[in-house]
Amino acid sequence: MAFPRQPTVATHRPPVTAATMILMPIVVGAAVAVVLGVYGRLHEPTGTAINIAGFSGTQAVKSWLTTGAFLLAGIQLVSALAMWDKLPGAPWVPTLHRWSGRFAVLLTVPVVVHCLYALGFQPGSPRVLIHSLLGCFFFGAFTTKMLLLTRRGLPSWVIPIIGGVVFSALVGIWLTSSLWFFTTVGVTL
Amino acid sequence: MSNRGPVLTLLAVTALAVVLYGFNVTTTRQTAASPPAAAQVPAQPPAADQPPAADQPPAADQPPAAAQQGTYAGRTADNKATIAIAVQDGQVAAYVCDGRRVESWLQGTIVDGRLTVQGASDARATGTVEGNAIFGTVWVNGKQWPYAAQLASPPAGLYQGSATANRTANRVGWIVLPDGTQVGVLNRNGIPKPAPRLDPKALSDVTVDGVQIEPQRVVGGTLVVGRPPA
């Protein structure tokens, strides 16, 4: 698996190649974000979708799933700092980073499916608009990051930047949904 | 060192999304494929209490039964809109909405099991009580829908809330169906849009663009047409 432990492999490559390598993942990621947003706006929200047993409602389920992803994102940040030698590392840190990231994103998938299917892209209030934009942006940025990871010889700043973007988007999503839910409706299952 | 990991992750995420989406679509289709609401409501058990018209002959066109106190909630025959009818001592407050653009508040009476309610812009509904349900027709925005509404116990029912701030009059109506589905419209200075989520059990305040709106349960005697409650 690609893992930029030595982030300076790209020195022998001309900058044009690096730009091209970065461009394609960004284009694909942007397309993903736009498609999600357009679908959310055009598809008629059903208002309902399948629920998970044991929770009071889909909002509670989504809030907790997003919170799970948010906590895993914290692990992502710390393990990424260790991988880039900003913190003391260990041999298992890259594995932790990969798998916590995978689980984080998998937790968000039921949430985005429900959001887009039942609620759609809503520009109604600032919170919901920001949440809708960030939600679409997050999956585009995540796609970009996954594709960038398959490229060898990227400039050393690329992966930390896109990783930070994905992380920030998720934090924004959590603030505009789960935190809002817990503070207005209450911390309920 | 393989570069496949991130791609496999992407594929797994996409696959999970597709599976969940398909699950949602299948579930919704099954609901939509079942008979229209007007046909399926009477099939539901009319509760174990007394037959509403026990003293009347079981003729084919027997007069409608007396309406019970409470709120009837249901859907139009094409499932496009929901309707809730709150009844209290012959007084009726009703609301029809599609959760997106169409909504109308209706006020009227129910006499001898016959419902007549009216609202703004020639919106109106008629209906007759049969057992624990009301069947009839509702007219909104020049469209006409047959509907069926079934007596529903809380938290199912009809809710409203309103608040005026920054020269914007916000009025929200929510219909909560017996299965917990809620359909609501937020009307801002006459422009309808989907309502924020209501917690029908806690009736906690909902916030619309920073304005707090306090939801209230609507009963038959609630004034819903004309002067909106403060």
Image: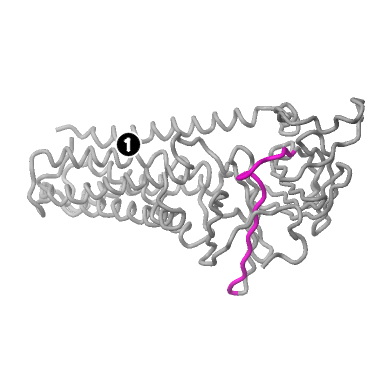
Whether residue A89 appears in magenta in the rendering, the answer is no
Q: Give, as a single range, the part of the protein colored magenta.
A: B149-166
Q: Give the percent coordinates (x, y) of residue A150.
A: 23, 39
Question: Is B222 in front, or is A169?
Answer: B222
Identify which residue is drawn at 77% across, 50% down.
B88
Taking B14 as reference, is B227 left or right?
right
By secondary structure, the bulk of the magenta-drawn segment is best described as strand
In the figure, A162 relative to B20: above or below? Answer: below
In the figure, A113 relative to B161: above or below? Answer: above
Q: Give the percent coordinates (x, y) of residue B61.
A: 92, 30
Residue B169, quarter of the rendered image: bottom right
Question: Is B173 in front, or is B62?
Answer: B62
Taking A140 as reference, is A126 left or right?
right
Residue A111, quarter of the rendered image: top left
Taking B35 as reference, is A75 left or right?
left
* The N terminus of chain A - image quarter: top left
> Residue placed farthest to the bottom in the image?
B166
In the figure, B189 relative to A99: above or below? Answer: below
Identify which residue is drawn at 69% across, 63% down.
B190
Q: Residues within 10 Å of mark 1 (few under 14, many from 20)?
A: many
Which chain letter goes with mark 1? B
Kind of residue indicated by mark 1: Leu
Residue B104, quarter of the rendered image: bottom right
Q: Which residue is mark 1?
A: B10
Q: How many marks?
A: 1
**SS class, disc 1:** helix
Q: How does the figure colour the protein chain or chains?
A: one colour
* The C terminus of chain A - image quarter: top left
Whether residue B162 appears in magenta in the rendering, the answer is yes
Q: Give the percent coordinates (x, y) of residue A113.
A: 45, 40
Q: Give the percent coordinates (x, y) of residue B25.
A: 54, 32
Question: Is A159 in front, or is A60?
Answer: A60
